[in-house]
Image (spheres, rainbow, N blue to C red):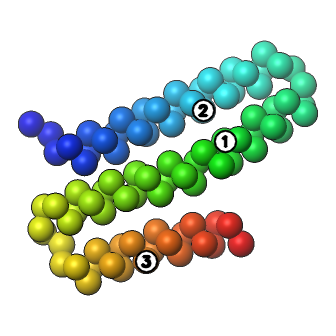
Amino acid sequence: MRDPAVLGMAALRYLSATVELVAATLMLRSGRVSTAVSINAALGLFGPTLFVIVSAIGIWGLAQSGSVSWARLAMIFSGVVLIVYGATR
């Protein structure tokens, strides 16, 4: 059986891919730049949120397995926070 954390991470990435494809289709169907920009802005919010959620699931999975020390988990979490911080500044 697969690890539940891996299944959750993969499922969210499949969801992300579906949302991206639907957004691209909506952009093409609208045929208007203003609508496409609005859709792209929504994706700009969705992407980082999904990144944080998938990373949190991965960190949770690592913590549950006990194979990674708490210090390393803290460093991984700090890295995720820094990536989000750097992307928003």
Residue behind mark 3:
78
User: Label 2 belongs to which residue?
Assistant: 20
Q: Which residue is depicted at the point 60% across and 45% down?
A: 46
Q: Position of residue 74 (x, y in %)?
A: 33, 78
The answer to whether the residue labelled 2 contacts the one labelled 3, judged by CB atoms less than 8 Å apart, is no
> Which class describes the residues within 10 Å of circle 3: few (<14), some (14-19), or many (20+)?
few
Spatial separation of the CA atoms under disc 2 and disc 3: 28 Å
Q: Secondary structure at mark 3?
A: helix
Residue 2 versus residue 19 in the image, above or below = below
Dot label at residue 85: none
Task: Assign a secondary structure to mark 1.
Answer: helix
Q: Residue furthest top?
A: 29
Spatial CA span between label 1 and label 3: 24 Å
Counting residues from the start of the chain, the first of labels 1 and 3 encountered is 1
Locate residue 82 relative to residue 45 in the image: left or right: left
Amino acid at pointer 3: Ser
Sooner in the amino-acid sequence: mark 2 or mark 1: 2
Going from N to C along the chain, the mark reached first, 2 or 3, is 2
Amino acid at circle 1: Leu
x, y percentage for residue 70?
22, 79
Residue shown at 30% from the left, 63% from the top: 59
> Compared to 36, does 47 lie above or below?
below
Please identify the quadrant where the C terminus is shown.
bottom right
The secondary structure type at the circle numbered 2 is: helix
At horizontal 46% and vertical 68% (from top left) the residue drawn is: 80
Q: Which residue is mark 1?
A: 43
Mark 2 touches mark 1? (CB < 8 Å): yes
- Left or right of 88? Residue 82 is left
Crowding at mark 1 (Cα within 10 Å: few <14, some 14-19, many 20+): some
